[in-house]
Image: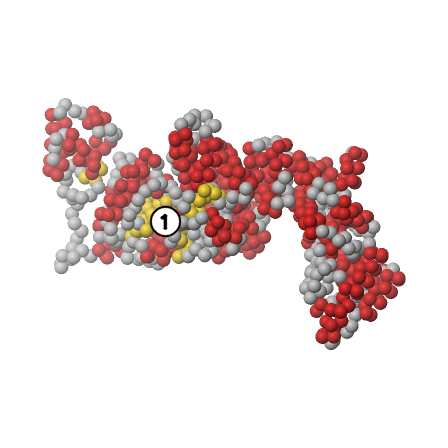
Amino acid sequence: MTGRSLSCSPEGIQKAKRALICYSLTQKVLADELEVTRQPIGKFFTGKPVDRNLFIQICDRLDLEWEEIVAEPASEPEVNQDNSIDIDAIVQGVREKIKPIIQQRCGTMRVLDMTKPIGLNDIYTSVNILEKITGRQRLGIDELLQQYRSQDLDLIGLNRITEKRVPGLEAVEKCSKLMILGKPGAGKTTFLKYLAIQCLGGEFQPERVPIFVTLKNFAEAANKPGLLQYITEEIINPICSIRDVVTYGKALILLDGLDEVREEDSDRILKEIREFSDRFPNNQFVMTCRIAAREYTFEKFTEVEVADFDDDQISNFTNNWFKDKAVKPETFIKRLKENNRIKQLAASPLLLTLLCLAFEESGDFPANRSELYKEGLDALLKKWDAKRGIQRDQIYKKLSVQRKEDLLSKIALTTFEVSEYFFKQKVAEQYITKYIRNLPGANTDEEALQLDSEQALRSIEHHHGLVVARAKRIYSFSHLTFHEYFTAREFVVVRQSSEEALQNLVSHITEKRWREVFLLAVGMSPSADRLLLFIKEKIDFIVADDQRLQQFLVWVREKSLSVNFPYKPAAVRAFYLSFDQSLLFSLDFDLSLSLDFDLSLSLDFDLSLSLSRSLDLSRSFDLSLDLFLFRTLNLDLSRTVDLDLSLDLSRSLDSELKNLLQKLREQLPSRQNRKEYQKWWLANWKAWCEELREVMIKYRNIGHDWQFSNEQKELLQQYYDANKLLVDCLNSDCYVSREVRQQIEDTLLLPIAEIKQRQQQS
């Protein structure tokens, strides 16, 4: 009599029909009065099970005692001679019968643009659990920044390394009632499916029967059945003993996607779950829900959070994905390590799947990263819910996908400009209020607007996971990658690359943390010509007003023109800029320290795909010699080069220069006696280096002591880094006209006077 579904006995049906006639009612009128459809009323009068509450309402309306007309409950399970039920035998029988049903529902997965389902066991990667919910920590912004900076600020968006992780299966074993929270695409549903398959295979709780319930389907089932009725009649209908399994506490009840239940069904489903779990407390319950989805209370459920994938999990998933495919997992992992921003996204199982799909197509990530990020955002903003037919609440739903992106772009730029990687809830709500108040049909009442903003922020978090809580009332973008992407989008898409917007962006060219924003902005621009020209102009004026630095650039140009080379002038200018820049910053170094010249700095200035990616010095004697002499001034005391004139390049040396170098070599003591060797260097290295410098200046025009101030050194470093960023932008697969590309290449690293002269001539 305590079940959630009741049915009329044959005698009760007759009494009910007489009462219907007595009150001059029809089944349709009765349905209208009770505000239900005709179908459950028809079931009542034919003896079929209906919801317990509705059964009692019908009886009350007909002035009948429901206990007098209800059918007797189903017969009890068979008992042994000692009056004890053999529940273990029933469980094993049900497990065998339920196996094909669970295999069909849980044995495969298919997400995003997969062309076909994939076996769960073929791809599954073990889940880790955080026992403390990230967004409920009582931490301040300063504490969060300190914790992330102790690792890497680029890792904003990932669970901190210090947080304790527990294997998913262990967490389930510890709690009989577990609520698993997680961001969209964190792998919650996959984990529940894995539990069901493991249970059936005897690897996990083999004494139980797994029952997988998609809560959205349950909530929208016809006639609004109770959970037990739904399980026994609609999920596992052919297996009559399933009711016994639940009654005797031998079920593993897996309730998936509480956040996917429609708002109008929410209260009923929450009440149903509470009552069901209280009525059958000996079963194992595991439920999933997105973080911040709803205000609810399940007092007897322990709440935990799905952790982001760590490096080992990413590797395991990748090995499974690319197994027996043309693309090797090692290649994917290598490229992932080389792209830190992309690697951030791999911490999400959903986005890792997207990365694998993209990589599988071409064997690499797109050169234009903005396209890859856009695809990831589309997955979170549109595809993930749409492909599963999920509708969310109304306030945030009023915003189209473009409006949502515009809102996130405004929040991103506003916070990024002031280095607010973390921002308070009230601040985020103010940004949202400012945006939505201008939308058609928006509330004009300030209090209503505030409530809408609160709900919109919560919706942004649980719908798409693009903005998430890091502590109580403190938020950030889910990944620094997305923060940077939306910041770039505000300039290019929302503000439509207006001159004011682009000049605002370009004003940050010397700030290293804006590097990715620039790369993304040129990548998402339909044409990057104007932006690149603004960048070039801004870079040139970094050192335009400093005469000493302009003289240095004149020397760089003259030196580049004085050598024979098979490369473009800009590439050789880059070589000498980085070459002598490293030299001038190291002339006062302690010779016990080594400074290895890294040619990759200059190689990054390869301005066309046709230019060789390696500067083969053996093909250019002049460059080889300059590098050789340069390294002589940058020696580790224990690894001093003896100016070995047997080098091939010495054959082409001017005889006078050759003699001078020979004399310098002869001054060096033997290295066999290390102590004497070191003693000589400590006493003579300055004078010896000055002699070498004079030789270098006279014969090679290198080694000048520019005597730059610290401020000038800083400006030159900014100039160098900004030019490197400009070239990276040119090589980032952005769309730029041939004319603009050539103009930038021709004037790269030239003194301002010559640039202006060329502009006047063009």
Q: Nearer the viewer, residue 703 or 234?
A: 703
Q: How is colour applied across the structure in the image? A: secondary structure
For the point 41% across and 39% down, which residue is it? 458
Q: Give the quarter of the figure containing the N terminus.
A: top left
Mark 1, secondary structure of its residue:
strand
Within 10 Å of disc 1 (Cα), the crowding (few <14, some 14-19, many 20+) is many
Task: Give x and y (percent) for residue 135.
Answer: 41, 47
In this view, 754 is above or below 133: above
Given residues 323 and 266, the one toward you in this image is 266
User: At 32% across and 57% down in the image, what residue appears?
Assistant: 174
Q: Is 149 located above or below residue 668 in the figure?
A: above
Res. 360 visible in picture: no
Identified at 69% across, 56% down, the residue is 598
In the image, is 259 to the left or to the right of 436? left
- Quarter holding the C terminus? top right
Residue 545 visible? The answer is: yes
Specify whether 87 is left or right of 542. Answer: left
Q: Is residue 182 left or right of residue 362?
A: left
Locate residue 235, reporting x and y percent. 30, 44
- Above or below, 441 against 504 in this view is above
- Residue 39: give x, y in percent of width and height: 24, 31
Which residue: 12% across, 31% down? 63
Q: Which residue is mark 1?
A: 180
Question: Furthest residue to the bottom?
Answer: 673
The spot of residue 180 in percent (x, y) is: 36, 49
- Residue closer to the observer: 64 or 441: 441
- Amino acid at pointer 1: Ile
